[in-house]
Amino acid sequence: MQLVIDHICQSFPAGGGRVLPVLEDISLTLREEEFVALVGPSGCGKSTLLNLCAGLLPPVSGSIRFTGDDLTAELRVSIVFQETGLMPWRNVYDNIAFGLEAGHLLPPAERDERIRHYIRLTGLSGFEKAYPHQLSGGMRQRVGIARALAVRPDLLLMDEPFSALDAQTRLLMQEELVSLWEKTRLTTLYVTHNIREAVMLADRVVLLSRRPGRVKDILEIRIPRAERALPEHSAEIAGLESRIWSHISRDAREAMTEVQP
Ligand SMILES: Nc1ncnc2c1ncn2[C@@H]1O[C@H](COP(=O)(O)OP(=O)(O)OP(=O)(O)O)[C@@H](O)[C@H]1O
Ligand SMILES: [Mg+2]
């Protein structure tokens, strides 16, 4: 299964009959079991592209489609937002169960086993009955990720899932995401502002220009994911980071000082 983003253009009404161009001619194919990070200055349309991929927004022009021999009739797309959107009145177990309560229902025993599997996988065992306010920020993010994974999506979309976390927790969550991803190998599109995070997590990093977002560059990260933190790769990792940063720093500065219409 591949996700084909084909010549996507997106704009929004900006009042007074004007339109705000947000994405310009985006073409990108996510391969089976590929982790692609999307990086670009604030306001360049990253969340918009994720919403388009999730089917939450129809494209103005171009198309987004799944291709491949193994396509099933019912494709599942999960999205993890910056704010996890957990339901405060539901405990951990019931929050994770939420995605399994609509559509094709699983037999109760299978559903229970599925939920417990993702609780174990995300390191939340023992916290099944805890409510969101009783968890740390990192644990809440893990519940959000477990909820997204529990539906066994064909495509996982993540929009800055760790940006609300402190730097230490964020590093730990990155490591956890690497080991979790190695176990699930879901085709993933991951939005982040954090260049290091992109380089540590992704198979490819896609750089968008400032708004209207266009694909400026695509970097392939060939170092095996589990080895990227090792000292022998630190120079190569730093080189990739500085290449990305030199691409986007000028755009980012301009975008920050730009007067929004
Ligand atoms: N529903 C909407 N209606 C009108 N304008 C919108 C809508 N959604 C997004 N925009 C505009 O589109 C542009 C891109 O927004 P988007 O949220 O995709 O950016 P982003 O790259 O995710 O930014 P950030 O990095 O700050 O999260 C912004 O100028 C925003 O104001
Ligand atoms: Mg965004």
Image: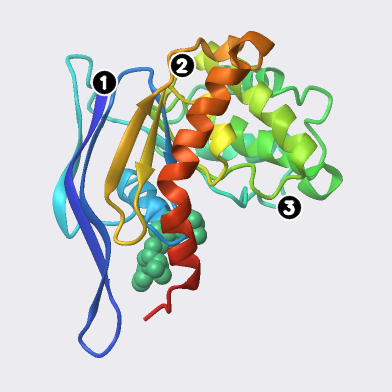
Secondary element at tag 2: loop
Residue at x 75%, y 41% (from the top left corner): 167
Secondary element at tag 3: loop
Looking at the image, the residue that sits furthest to the bottom is 16
Q: Locate residue 192 relative to residue 32 in the image: left or right.
A: right
Q: Is residue 158 visible?
A: no
Residue at x 25%, y 24% (from the top left corner): 2
Q: Is residue 170 above or below residue 31?
A: below
Residue 107 is situated, as x and y percent measured from the top left of the image, at: 51, 22
Residue 187 in which image quadrant: top left
- Foreground pick, 158 / 229: 229
Q: Residues within 10 Å of mark 2 (few under 14, many from 20)?
A: some
Secondary element at tag 1: loop
Q: Locate residue 224 relative to residue 30 in the image: left or right.
A: right
Q: Locate residue 109 relative to residue 256 in the image: left or right.
A: right
Looking at the image, is mark 3 or mark 1 nearer the viewer? Answer: 1
- Residue bearing mark 1: 1
Sequence-wise, which precedes: disc 3 or disc 2?
3
Residue 156 in which image quadrant: top left
Instruction: Check mark 1 vs ligand 1: CB closer than 8 Å? yes or no.
Output: no
Q: Which amino acid type is shown beneath numbered disc 1?
A: Met
Rounded to the nearest angstrom, the CA distance separating label 3 from label 1 is: 36 Å
Residue at x 54%, y 48% (from the top left corner): 81
Looking at the image, is mark 3 or mark 2 nearer the viewer? Answer: 2
- Residue bearing mark 3: 89
- Residue bearing mark 2: 185
Q: Which amino acid type is shown beneath numbered disc 2?
A: Arg
Asked whether the residues under the numbered discs 3 and 2 touch, taking CB atoms below 8 Å apart as contact, a structural biologist would say no
Q: Residues within 10 Å of mark 1 (few under 14, many from 20)?
A: some
Sequence-wise, which precedes: disc 3 or disc 1?
1
Rounded to the nearest angstrom, the CA distance separating label 3 from label 2 is: 31 Å
